[in-house]
Amino acid sequence: MSNRTASQARNTAETKIKISLDLDGSGKSSIATRIPFFDHMLTLFSRHSLIDLNVEVDGDVEVDFHHTVEDTGIVLGECINSAMGDKDGIRRYGHAYVPMDETLCRSVIDLSNRPQLELRTPEQTADAQNFPFTLVEEFCRALASNLRCNLHIEVLYGRDGHHIAESIFKSMAVALRIASENDPRRKGIPSTKEVL
């Protein structure tokens, strides 16, 4: 497997974003989005996916956090997709159950080149302090759409908004790590179409 790194930038009237990553890293990160809770989520995403990740965002957080969170998901998805290249030799599928205190979340991913998000959470999921839970869904949708993957996330149970968000980000990270890893038995593209 060749060097799987990528860099992407996106500049709009609402956000200026630069992301670089190494899919085969050790989970080192430098994250600066001006949203402390989101920085925390991206840091643990890096740590548990083992993706070395550098994120710099200057967004209109004085309006709200929506543009920064969604646009970061867009660029991160594009960047991971680019780093995987033609996906030769990857496992393609990954899943993970991650507990976080009273919360349990399952994430399942197929790096299929077909974007789809299915997110199931308890009714009236609480917000984390200073971070609306709706933004977790916006990030996941932007990531799945631009990584071009099937991403199924189900919070099996949980009460605390911080714990639910953290369990989602961690389980996504572990599932992605498994799916994007090299399978030593795999020869070629993991699809009968011979392309993903």
Image (tube, rainbow, N blue to C red):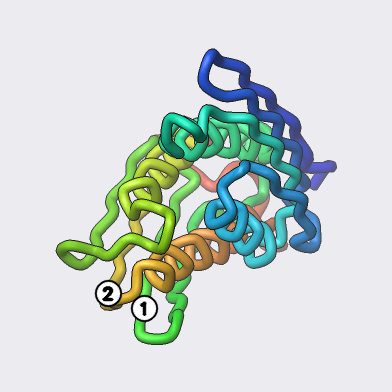
Residue 43 percent coordinates (x, y)? 65, 58
Q: Please say whether residue 140 is visible from this viewpoint.
A: yes
Alpha carbon separation for disc pair 2 and 1: 6 Å
Asked whether the residues under the numbered discs 2 and 1 touch, taking CB atoms below 8 Å apart as contact, a structural biologist would say yes
Which amino acid is tagged 1?
A: Leu
Give the vertical position of 195 relative to 155 (above or below): above
Residue 110 percent coordinates (x, y)? 44, 50
**Residue that sits furthest to the front in the current view:** 62
**Residue that sits furthest to the right in the current view:** 3
Q: Secondary structure at mark 2?
A: strand
> Position of 124 compared to 49: left or right?
left
> Going 24% across and 59% down the picture, which residue do you hit?
120
Q: Which mark is residue 104?
A: 1
In the image shown, does 182 or 65 lie closer to the viewer?
A: 65
The answer to which of marks 2 and 1 sits earlier in the sequence is 1
> Going 71% across and 54% down the picture, which residue do you hit?
51
Residue 80's quadrant in the figure? top right
Which amino acid is tagged 2?
A: Leu
Q: Which mark is residue 156?
A: 2
> Position of 70 compared to 118: left or right?
right
In the image shown, does 122 or 133 lie closer to the viewer?
A: 133
Give the vertical position of 122 relative to 23 (above or below): below
